[in-house]
Amino acid sequence: AHCGFMPFQQLVALMGFTEGLCSLATDPDVVKDMLNAMVDWIEPVMYRVIDAYKPDIWDMLDDTAAKHTPFFSLDTYRDIFVPIYKRLAKPAVERGIPIQFHNCGKCEIFVEDMVDFGVKYWDPAQEMNDLLGIKEKYKGGLNG
């Protein structure tokens, strides 16, 4: 089952790419409030979906990086997006459902946080990331 919400993708879909990135820098509290309000709406739906369909895997996604670098800093990721991802992962984590997270590009600086909020499978683990280093660090705790 898919969690149905991609915070960064929703931000840029609503505001445009440039304006979305600018809002992360100039109005981070407003962005947090907006994203949390959206999750307030979808969170009960996610619980109902999991309870009704009993999926074998919980699919999350949010493309937060380009080929050579993330779209924003690790600090911004941790301040704005990680709390949202934790909320989106919580229904699956509470029920012991493994989480697959799709995140394209050079996003290796986000992997530690992904594992912390419950990700077991990273899709796609692309070659511009240090895949061997990540594999060694997580020793089977993360699959790509």
Image (cartoon, rainbow, N blue to C red):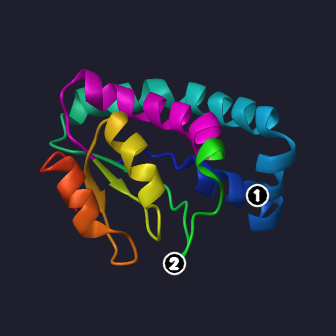
- Using the rendered view, name the quadrant where residue 14 is placed: bottom right
Segment tinted magenta in the rendering: 77-99
84 or 67: which is nearer to us? Answer: 67
Location of the C terminus (image quadrant): bottom left
List the residue tagged with mark 1. 21
Location of residue 12 with respect to 52 vertically, above or below: below
| Most foreground residue, 120 or 51 | 120
Q: Determine whether, in the image, residue 38 is placed left or right of residue 68.
A: right
Cα–Cα gap, marks 1 and 2: 17 Å
Name the disc covering residue 67, or none: 2
Image location (x, y in percent) of residue 120: 23, 46
Q: How crowded is mark 1: few (under 14 residues within 10 Å), some or many (20 or more)?
A: some
> Magenta span has 28?
no
Q: In this view, does 66 lie to the left or right of 91?
A: right
**Relative to 51, residue 80 above or below:** below
Q: For the residue marked with disc 1, what is the amino acid?
A: Leu
- Say left or right for 111 vs 26: left
User: Can residue 142 be spotted in the picture?
Assistant: no
Residue lying at 55% horizontally and 60% vertically, measured from the top left: 64
Q: Is residue 120 left or right of residue 17?
A: left
Specify the amino acid type for callout 2: Lys
Q: Residue at x 78, y 39 (%)?
A: 28
| Place of residue 95 in the rendered image (x, y in percent of width and height, measured from the top left) | 21, 24
In primary-sequence order, the first of circles 1 and 2 is 1
Q: Position of residue 9 (x, y in %)?
A: 60, 57
